[in-house]
Amino acid sequence: MAGGQQRVGRITPRVKALLELSCHDNAPIYMGAANIAHMQTEHPKAYAKYGALIPQILRAPDYVGKNPKDNSIEYVKEFLTERDYVKVAVRVSAGGTFFARTLYVLQPNRVNNFIQKGTLKRV
């Protein structure tokens, strides 16, 4: 992919089925310089701590969900040693390409509420 974008993951058939997505199986997820700059500016502590783990979070999330506000795909990984729930939001571009747009730490009570409401589904 041009513009310094790197592939950091894929939409697995399991995630596609859980969230009823219309993309093709194993659609690639990219991350570019603008995405990284956004994470470093908006969530510097979370990015410093977990940015290098984005491919791992996308490969093996504990939960996934679809945000009804912006239609993004939310990948959430629980890091037990830190007791952090880390979310990577993936958005689709106008051209149909998926990008890891942002990363931040969620409050545990919010995660539990999302799980109870069915907004986040265990993978």
Image: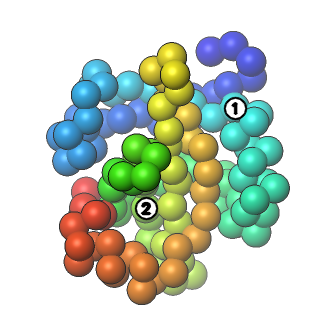
Residue 107 locus on image (x, y percent): 51, 81
Crowding at dot 2, Cα within 10 Å, few <14 / some 14-19 / many 20+, comes out as many
| Kind of residue sitting beneath label 2 | Val
Can residue 29 be seen in the rendering of this structure? no
Which disc is residue 3 wearing? none
Quarter holding the N terminus? top right
In the orientation shown, which residue stands out farthest toward the top? 2
Residue 78: horizontal and vertical position, in percent? 44, 71
Q: Looking at the image, which residue sits at the far front?
A: 69
Q: Distance between the residues labelled 1 and 2?
A: 20 Å
Residue placed under numbered mark 2 in the picture: 76
Which amino acid lies under the numbered mark 1 shown in the image of this protein? Gly
Image label count: 2
Helix, strand or loop status at disc 1: loop
- Can residue 104 be seen here? The reply is yes
| x and y percentages locating residue 62 in the rendered image | 34, 63
Q: In which quarter of the image is residue 117?
A: bottom left
Residue count near mark 1 (Cα–Cα under 10 Å), binned few <14, some 14–19, many ≥20: some
Mark drawn on residue 32: 1
| Most foreground residue, 117 or 102 | 117
Q: Upstream in the sequence, badge 1 or badge 2?
A: 1
Say which quarter of the image contains residue 76.
bottom left
The residue at 76%/34% (across/down) is: 33
